[in-house]
Amino acid sequence: MGSLKDQEQEQAKCAWVQGPIIVGAGPSGLAVAACLSQHGVPSVILEKSDCIASLWKHRTYDCLKLHLPKHFCELPLMGFPPNFPKYPTKYQFVSYLESYASHFSIQPRFNQTVTSAEFDQSCGFWTVRTQDFEYISRWLVVATGENAEPVIPKISGMESFHGPIVHASLFKSGSDYKNQRVLIIGCGNSGMEASLDLCRHNAFPFMVARNTIHVLPREMLGFSTFGIATTLLKWFPLRLVDKFLLALTSFILGNTDRYGLRRPKTGPIELKNATGKTPVLDVGALSQIKSGKIKVMQGVKEITRNSVKFVDGQEREFDAIILATGYKSNVPTWLKGCDFFTEDGMPKTPFPEGWKGENGLYTVGFTRRGLLGTASDSTKIAQDIAHRWRTVKDSKNYRNSHIVLLRSSLCPSRPNQLVKCKKDN
């Protein structure tokens, strides 16, 4: 027989969660937990890193600011401090999220990497496994979002390049590249802003614009471009609003095609809704492109030891390469036996109905509409779970502790028949 300590350790490997399990402690996970708390519903957040909002803290560049005015980026139930600027810095946003978690007494379980989550049809519960624990609940909220993992493209010759090749998630400041020739592959918001920061620190950025891209001014006539668009959409058809935005953009910025930034034929809002491709909101990079300080290149054909060959026949030497190639969902790697998501890890059901699946499955942070979409979906999820929670709470099987540790030997089979060992307070 094992010792009492061994038995306790065995017992502590599995837990029954009275409320929902939330995977991810970014803004989406925090928003759902806060909304649930307002309904009196407990929850458990599992987070693979050692902090909340790890993407914002550890995988963003130093000069990052919110691209939209702060009132479009607030989470439910708590606004930004009034002394924050119109476009808060990443540090201010992280501070806001930490205050948000503290205000709603949200305490995620850190260093819990979810390896699998699966619904058991025989007993009607979700089993969520981490590297050293199992959690069981009636409800599962997927809050890992659209940007869980960096996208690393495969380019011929990458392995032979003599200098550093880093994803934009590891780029911190242009000061690390002073006097260096840097190739930025990607011309979205990250690629544009990394290029601008490199200019500010006396580097020599070259930016690859392989595909078409909409570049809009962040503000028009003193108002947020996004704010103007959302207001106009209340009164006018989407395509008419797109035409208005592009006409005003052409007047303010000029013809971006002249600088190698070809516009798509589809308007910016229509394209965003259809594909999730976000227009660039210019914060100064375009003026540097016009002046020649940021040079726009066509697609990359091949990377050699010292240089990069482009599809138009040019070849240039570089000291470093930054991959501003975006992010992707990681849901397919751990959510098992579920056809609610596509192979790309996005809900098959489009916004605004993609927040709820079957068997107690919910998703938040997958709307392709930023923090506004998160706020909308988290409110709906909390209301739906709260309605079902009241039924469970009134049942004779309800226990006061929202986490009950169970004997792991019994855990994977019949959660409704599990033996309670002790409470985790």
Image (tube, rainbow, N blue to C red):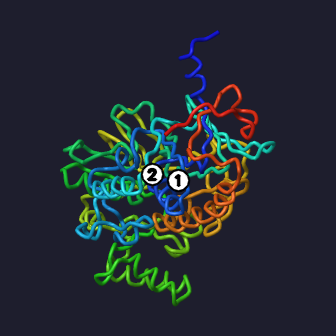
Of residues 274 and 379, the one nearer the viewer is: 379
Above or below for 191 versus 229: above
The amino acid type found where label 2 is placed reads: Gly
Splitting the image into 4 quarters, where does residue 165 fall? top left
Of residues 262 and 166, the one nearer the viewer is: 166
Q: Does 361 sit left or right of 261 as displayed? A: right
Going from N to C along the chain, the mark reached first, 1 or 2, is: 2
The residue where tag 2 is placed is 26
Q: Secondary structure at mark 2?
A: loop
Q: Secondary structure at mark 1?
A: loop
Residue at the far bottom in the pictured view = 235
Above or below for 326 versus 242: above
User: Which labelled disc corresponds to residue 348?
Assistant: none
* Rendering coords of residue 118 (x, y %): 69, 42
Above or below for 137 versus 70: above
* Rendering coords of residue 219 (x, y %): 32, 76
Count of numbered circles in the view:
2
Q: Are marks 1 and 2 in contact (CB under 8 Å)?
A: yes
Mark 1: few/some/many CA within 10 Å (<14, 14-19, 20+): many
User: Looking at the image, which residue is at 45% across and 66% down?
Assistant: 76
The residue where tag 1 is placed is 145
User: Looking at the image, which residue is at 49% across and 51% down?
Assistant: 147
Residue at the far right in the pictured view = 122
